[in-house]
Image (cartoon, rainbow, N blue to C red):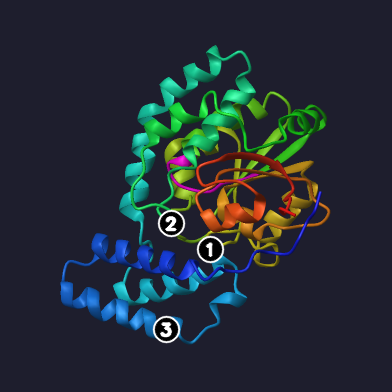
Amino acid sequence: MLIFSSMKAFLECIPCILRQAIQILKSNVKSPRKREQIIKAMLRCLEKIDVFKLTPPEATKFAHDEMKKLVGKEDLYAKEKDESNKEALSLYPRLKRMVQKAKDPLNMALRLSIAGNIIDYGAHSEFCVHSAIESVIDRKFAIDNYQEFTRRLRKAKQILYVGDNAGEIVFDKLLVQELKKYAEVVFAVKSKPALNDVLMKDAKFVGMDKLCKVIKSGSDNAGTILSQTTKEFKKVYNAADFVIAKGQGNLETLIDNKKPIFYLLMMKCVFLGEIYGVKKGDIILSYGIKKKT
């Protein structure tokens, strides 16, 4: 298993950040003139930093922090997160039945958890949750470490589950319920708004706090940078038998040479996928990070 340092931003991250900014403006600012003023101000702000020395989540945070000031709103995706949570909850009874009827409930719960990873306004302007659900049921994992996952799960006493997006957390509940048959689960959420990432209020809204202990990570960007996490997060991180890290942001930032980490996601970036030898849209259950040679 080849482990390497946190992924630095690509040239292609810049148009992605701009797409996000335009999406935010369309959702939060009505005046075309004000939209133009804000986007120009954000571009001037981006000129002051070296994007390529940052991870993609750090570069995105820098831009979004400026957007928060310019738009005058702390949670730029509040509406989208609320809608995602409600839509996912409406699907939950059906998803639960799918897990219960599966030959391998744990495997199905993993797949559906990945399907929920499609709910990502950082990577997409539009997406279809229903299509994602159908696509993951019988699909092969592009990186498949399921056997290693089950081997470690049978021996585990505590698991740290690092969440990703609002709405997606409902899909995560299915997996947490299966994991709890083996070990204690602690679910981590962001401490402050970052993209459409899950916060404590989202965890409470969907009932994750009724299922397991929920903690704040200390992170306020799309990833999880260990040096910036809370004491409570570090304590759980160190004590856990292994970590489940959801989504690309965590894959890009949550790197450790000693800790067993399973990365669980749907690949949404062509350029990041090339590094790991996978394609955009592939589903991944990877133990550690293996760089394509």
Q: Position of residue 185 (x, y in %)?
A: 67, 37
Q: CA distance from mark 2 to mark 1?
A: 11 Å
Label 2 belongs to which residue?
Answer: 122
Tell me the amino acid under the disc marked 1. Answer: Asn
* 67, 233: nearer the viewer: 67
Magenta residues, start to end? 161-168
**Secondary structure of the magenta portion, mostly?**
loop
Q: Which mark is residue 45?
A: 3
Circle 2 crowding by C-alpha within 10 Å: few under 14, some 14–19, many from 20: many
Image depth: mark 2 or mark 1 in front: 2
Residue at left offset 39%, top offset 85%? 44
Measured from the top left, where is residue 155 in percent x and y? 83, 30
Q: Quadrant of the C terminus?
A: bottom right
Residue at mark 1? 221
**Is 70 positioned to the left or the right of 273 in the image?**
left
State the image coordinates of residue 57 (x, y, percent, origin top left): 54, 64
Coordinates of residue 81 in the picture (x, y in percent) = 37, 48
Identify which residue is drawn at 71% across, 39% down.
159
Element type where label 3 sits in the image: helix
Report the amino acid beneath label 3: Cys
Residue at figure coordinates x 77%, y 44% from the top left: 240
Name the kind of residue labelled 2 in the image: Gly
Disc 2 from disc 3: Cα separation = 20 Å
